[in-house]
Image (tube, rainbow, N blue to C red):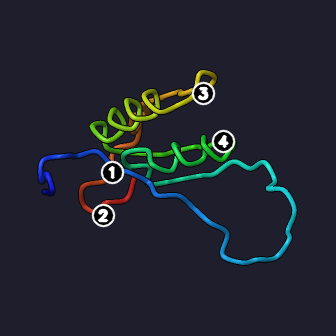
Amino acid sequence: MLDKFNTETKTIGWQPSCGCDAGDPVRATVLDPFFGAGTTGIITDRLNRDCIGIELSEPYLLMAKKRLRKVGGLFSKVVISMARPTLKPDIATGVG
């Protein structure tokens, strides 16, 4: 029976979309401007890549931090930096 209150997610994996022999993957850094719960960070860690995640919602950022620390390996490095907007938008135009 499906537990409708279970919030755990499971990523089923990634497979290459072609059968070509492209060689070994190149080390890369992935930029996710909508980081959410951190799934991109988890997958990039599993694929031995670095990830920069940007998230505006503090609750999602804290959720991502918890998930990354839980599933990250012994040598995974999780750095969370909260940036606060410094410019107030102009009320009449909405432009900062």
Disc marking residue 51: none
Q: Earlier in the sequence, mark 2 or mark 3?
A: 3
Give the residue displayed 79% in from the left and 56% down from the top: 25
* Residue contact between numbered discs 2 and 4, judged by CB atoms under 8 Å: no
Q: Is there CB contact under 8 Å for labels 1 and 2?
A: yes
Mark 2 lies on a secondary structure that is loop
> How far separated are the C-alphas under marks 1 and 2?
8 Å
* Mark 4 residue type: Asp
- Which x, y percent locates residue 61? 36, 37
What's the residue type where badge 3 is placed?
A: Ser
* Depicted 58 relative to depicted 96: above or below: above
Q: Residue at x 39, y 38 (%)?
A: 64
Q: Residues within 10 Å of mark 3 (few under 14, many from 20)?
A: some
Q: Are marks 4 and 3 in contact (CB under 8 Å)?
A: no
**Residue 16 in which image quadrant:** bottom right
Tally the numbered discs. Answer: 4
Tell me how far mark 4 sits from mark 3, CA to CA.
10 Å
For mark 1, what is the residue? 89
Q: Which residue is mark 2?
A: 93
Residue highlighted by disc 4? 50
Q: Choose top left, top right, bottom left or bottom right for residue 1.
A: bottom left
Mark toward the start of the polypeptide (1 vs 4): 4
Residue 34 x/y as whole percent = 43, 54
- Helix, strand or loop status at disc 4: strand
Residue 26: x %, y % from top left: 81, 53
